[in-house]
Image: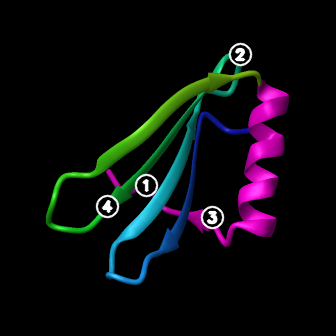
Amino acid sequence: MDNTFWLIRSSSDGGIEYVCFRGGDEPVEMLEGYHLPPQMPLIKRRRWMNRSEAISCRHRLESSEGFQLGRALF
């Protein structure tokens, strides 16, 4: 996993739900949030996990929750 990795998905109101993984080593920080420009991004949850947990979480988000690789939102 790279140092920063973004997953995004569109919401019905035009905003973007995002998950950002930061840190290539232990621990990996995971930020979950929502952004509806021009408002400031909202961080809903922040947690730290080991690298293997982060990889597993990324695959689950992509395969069953509709998130896709995206560019950094902020």
38 with respect to 14 (left or right): left
Give amino acid for label 2. Answer: Glu
- Magenta-tinted stretch: 51-74
Real-space CA distance between mark 1 and mark 4, rounded to the nearest whole angstrom: 12 Å
Identify the residue shown where x is 27% and y is 52%: 41
Q: Secondary structure at mark 3?
A: strand
Q: Earlier in the sequence, mark 2 or mark 3?
A: 2
Of callouts 2 and 1, the N-terminal one = 2
Within 10 angstroms of label 3, few (less than 14), some, or many (20 or more) residues?
some
Residue that label 4 marks? 35
- Residue 13: x percent and y percent? 32, 81
- Write the residue at 69% across / 24% down: 49
Assign the N terminus to one quadrant of the image. top right
Q: Are marks 3 and 1 in contact (CB under 8 Å)?
A: no
Reading the image, the residue beneath label 3 is: 69
Q: Disc 1 residue type?
A: Ala
Q: Which image quadrant is residue 21 in?
A: top right
Above or below, comparing residue 71 to residue 41 in the picture: below
The local secondary structure at tag 1 comes to: loop
Q: Residue at x 81, y 54 (%)?
A: 59
Is 53 covered by the magenta stretch? yes
Nearer the camera: disc 4 or disc 2: 4
> Label 2, on which residue?
26
Residue beneath disc 1: 72
